Image (tube, rainbow, N blue to C red):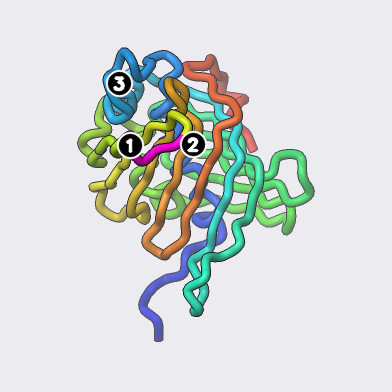
Amino acid sequence: MNPIRKPSRARTALKPFALSLCLALTASLATPLSASGSPSQALIAIDKTTYSGHLELYVDRYDPPGKDGKPAVPERYRAQVLFERPDRFRLVLRPGEWNEFRAVGEAGIVRWLDLATGISGKKAAEDVTDPLALWLLGTAGELPRFTRTTDLPPGGMKGGLHAARLDPDTFGSGIVQATAWFDKETPVGMEFRFHDGSSVFASILRFDRNVQTSPGDFQL
């Protein structure tokens, strides 16, 4: 019998939340790279000054490679994320489509609704959300505690892109490594690689920092 528990549908669906939250905290719209000195410093600076955010993304999710070693064909869909520290978020995958997936988290509880199946559920946030995302949501200015950040050599980047690598140091996280990409002073995307061999890349279409929210914003 395989002792490794397969991830639940909800946990798999919530993978984009883990990366989207990290994306939100990396956005350098208010702290240009020229001011912060490097992509790594931009990540740390924004982590200290972001209390809420709204993102619109394109997500490419790759399953683990097949037995032949060939990479899987990615599944692409739009995603929306709204979050407010220390514990609120709302994630919508494929908004407006027949198979839209919604999840909201608050006070340590995550509730979700899968429109494709009509199935809804509720679990403790720690059971369906990556620990790194929960720690980043619940703290401010603590990024160096949970992940090591390193600037990648600019010589290998094309078209003026800069990047920082994040190596999580958080117990129980399924994230092996992440890379945040910047085009000059603007964040353009982030790639996450997971322990199970899958990966996710998110392209930022829109990001608003420190937005005003109300309790009604975090409803299914």
- Amino acid tagged 3: Ala
Crowding near pointer 2: few (<14 within 10 Å), some, many (20+)? many
Q: Position of residue 2 (x, y in %)?
A: 40, 81
Say what secondary structure mark 2 lies in.
strand
Q: Nearer the viewer, residue 91 or 27?
A: 27
Q: Nearer the viewer, residue 157 or 109?
A: 157
User: Alpha-carbon distance for marks 1 and 2?
Assistant: 19 Å
Task: Decide which of tag 3 and tag 1 comes sooner along the chain.
Answer: 3
Say what secondary structure mark 1 lies in.
helix
Q: Which one is in front in this view, the residue at disc 1 or the one at disc 2?
A: 1
Q: Quadrant of residue 155?
A: top left
- Amino acid tagged 2: Gly
Above or below residue 169? Residue 89 is above
The residue located at (36%, 52%) in the rendering is 175
Magenta portion: prevailing SS class: helix
The answer to whether one can see residue 123 in this image is yes
The residue located at (27%, 25%) in the rendering is 41
Q: Position of residue 25 (x, y in %)?
A: 40, 28
Q: Which residue is mark 1?
A: 155
Check the picture and name the quadrant holding the C terminus: top right
Q: Which residue is mark 3?
A: 45
Q: Which residue is mark 2?
A: 189
Q: Nearer the viewer, residue 111 or 205?
A: 205
Magenta residues span 154-158
